Amino acid sequence: KSAEQLLKDKELEKAEKLFQLALQQAVRKSEQAAGYYGLARIALAQDNPDDAETLLEQTLELEPEASIRAWALVYLGKLRLEVGEREKAAICFQDALKVEGATEMARAEAQKGLQQISK
C-alpha cells in the first residue's frame, strides 16, 4: 500500500514510516515537500496541531507542487482559525486561492474558511 492509502485507511504508524522514508530518499525539493505534507496530515489525524503547523510551514518552504501548496495553506489557515488567529488564517486562505493549479476542492475549502472568518 502507498503512504497515501495507509493514511486514508487510518493506518497512521505505517503511513508515517513510509512518508519518513520518502523524505529521506527525496532528491528534489518538491519530493521533500510532499513528505513533510504527508507527515503534517498524520500529525493532524493524531490531533497534534503544533507539529502539524511546523510540518506545513516546512512543506511551504520547499517549493511544493501546486496542489500540495494550496492544501498546505488551507490546513494552516484552519489551524490558525482554531487558535483565533483570524487575520493569519485569512492570509493563508487567500494565498491558497491564488495558487495556480490548485484543486477545486482546495479552492472550495479556502472559500469556506474565508466565509467562517467573515461571520
Image (spheres, rainbow, N blue to C red):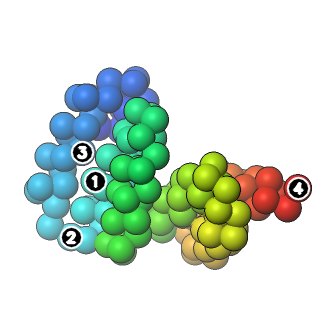
Q: Nearer the viewer, mark 3 or mark 2?
A: 3
Q: Position of residue 104 (x, y in %)?
A: 66, 56
Give the residue type that dot 4 points to: Lys
Return the disc, 4 or 1, that comes first in the chain's sequence: 1
Give the residue type that dot 2 points to: Arg
Q: Position of residue 105 (x, y in %)?
A: 65, 51
Return the disc, 4 or 3, that comes first in the chain's sequence: 3
* Left or right, 29 with reference to 27: right
* Disc 3: which residue: 19
The CA span between labels 2 and 4 is 41 Å
The CA span between labels 3 and 1 is 5 Å
Give the residue type that dot 1 points to: Gly
* Disc 4: which residue: 119
The CA span between labels 4 and 3 is 37 Å
Q: Secondary structure at mark 1?
A: helix
The CA span between labels 1 and 2 is 11 Å
Return the disc, 1 or 2, that comes first in the chain's sequence: 2
* Left or right, 69 with reference to 22: right
* Disc 2: which residue: 28
For residue 111, above or below residue 11: below
* Disc 1: which residue: 35
Q: Is residue 84 visible?
A: yes
* Left or right, 115 with reference to 73: right
Give the residue type that dot 3 points to: Phe
Quadrant the C terminus occupies: bottom right
Q: Nearer the viewer, mark 1 or mark 2?
A: 1
Return the disc, 3 or 2, that comes first in the chain's sequence: 3
